[in-house]
Amino acid sequence: MPTNAALIEGLETRASVDTLREVTEALAPIEREAGSAGEREAAEWLAERLEAAGASVQIDEEEFLDGYADLLAGFSAAGVASGAAALTGRARGLATACGAAVAALIVDEVSNGVRPVRRALAERKTTWNVVAETGDPAAERTVVFLAHHDAAHGGAAFDQTMQKKFTNWFPGVVERIDTAIPVWWGVAAGPALVALGAATGRRGLAKAGTALSAVSVAAFKDIARTPVVPGANDNLSGVAALVALAEAFRDRPVAGLRIVLASCGAEEVLQGGIYGFARRRLAPLHRDRTWVINIETVGSPELAMLEGEGAFVMEDYFDRGLRDLVERVANEEGIPLRRGMRASTSTDSLIPSRMGYPTACLISLNRHKGLSNYHAPTDVPENLSYRTIACATDLAEGVARRLAPR
């Protein structure tokens, strides 16, 4: 029996691969760091392309708080300082309090929490959300398709060598695990171990926590100074799907349904533009007549759907019924779709889900259950599985048609 990836490569799709290639190849050469001139250039190009596909388009300027890598490097440096204080033996109480506070701030920051330090200290920048509409503007029902057009910094932390080796050594173990490794736990564990070591007087724990925090400082500093990657898979694949969807609804209109195609900016700073979109565009929509589908990094060989995400506490997306519908449509259309996956990193899906909107997130995986070329300089259009992107587009179109009134 062929693998899902092989089955996808053999499928005929409605979505035009030529359109998908056009979008990714036009935008990938633009350096699209969050809040940069390149990100704005990409947003303007995308707006024009969506208009050419028959949609009504606006670009919303939104404010976001920058500094994810430098901010987390600062938190980790505070963990190192707390560890040094604990190891002197004369400031154990201060080290306990500081280590615990830093660990809590890291958890809050990467979980899209209150983010008090980012709000107080981070630079406020402008990002550009491209919001296109098609379908019936007066319809009571709305389907929102999300993607993001900014790109991430690379860094040694994203190297997938060990992940690939582990799959080759233990393929059965990898196949059974559908929840991603909690990559953020180690970052918070540094200051947490410092606090625990200082509180109990166990120098070994304090040393381990200090070392972990130092590693985190180095990793985040490396990310901050590493160039921005082309971001073809993450997430021009989703942006290309939005354009292909606009063409699909132009050529094959759907009655009684409003379609919103939104590409947000500044996603790679652990969510930026999505907050403005949610406040300005999503909040006015009725929660019982609106559905959100995020198309996020769908250029790997195998199409999958996330059930939820969480850096520390796993949150399944609101309303399983939408995810069940996505699966039914995939089965009806003969599109192989892997279910049961949960991510330990964050996507823009989390924000509408927390607002109580039915939410689903389409992703893609390679044979190592990783995102192909994730945050790597090799994330270029030539390395995309365009057939997977086309399948994601067809699936998204099919779900929208099922949600339209009959």
Image (cartoon, rainbow, N blue to C red):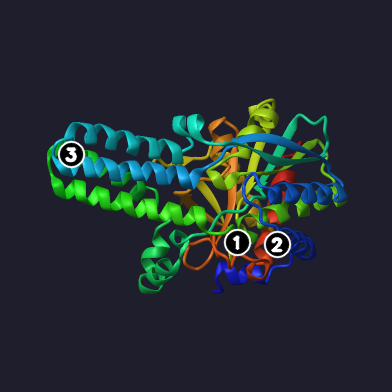
| Image position, residue 277 (x, y; %) | 66, 34
Element at label 2 = loop
Q: Which mark is residue 186?
A: none
Locate the C terminus and report the quarter of the image it occupies.
Answer: top right
Tell me which label, 1 or 2, sits earlier in the chain. Answer: 2
Name which residue lies at 61% across and 53% down.
151
Left or right of residue 209: residue 370: right
Name which residue lies at 82% across and 43% down.
254
Q: Label 2 crowding class (10 Å Cα cut-off): few <14, some 14-19, many 20+?
A: some
Element at label 1 = loop
Q: Do callouts 1 and 2 mark residues in contact (Cβ within 8 Å)?
A: no
Between circles 1 and 3, the one closer to the viewer is 3
Label 1: which residue? 336
Label 3: which residue? 198
| Image position, residue 268 (x, y; %) | 56, 48
**Whether residue 302 is situated above or below residue 405 in the rendered picture:** below
| Image position, residue 44 (x, y; %) | 78, 47
Left or right of residue 134: residue 367: left
- Residue type, label 2: Pro
Q: Distance between the residues labelled 1 and 2?
A: 31 Å
Q: Distance between the residues labelled 1 and 3?
A: 52 Å
Locate the N terminus and report the quarter of the image it occupies.
Answer: bottom right
Name which residue lies at 73% across and 36% down.
60
Label 2: which residue? 29
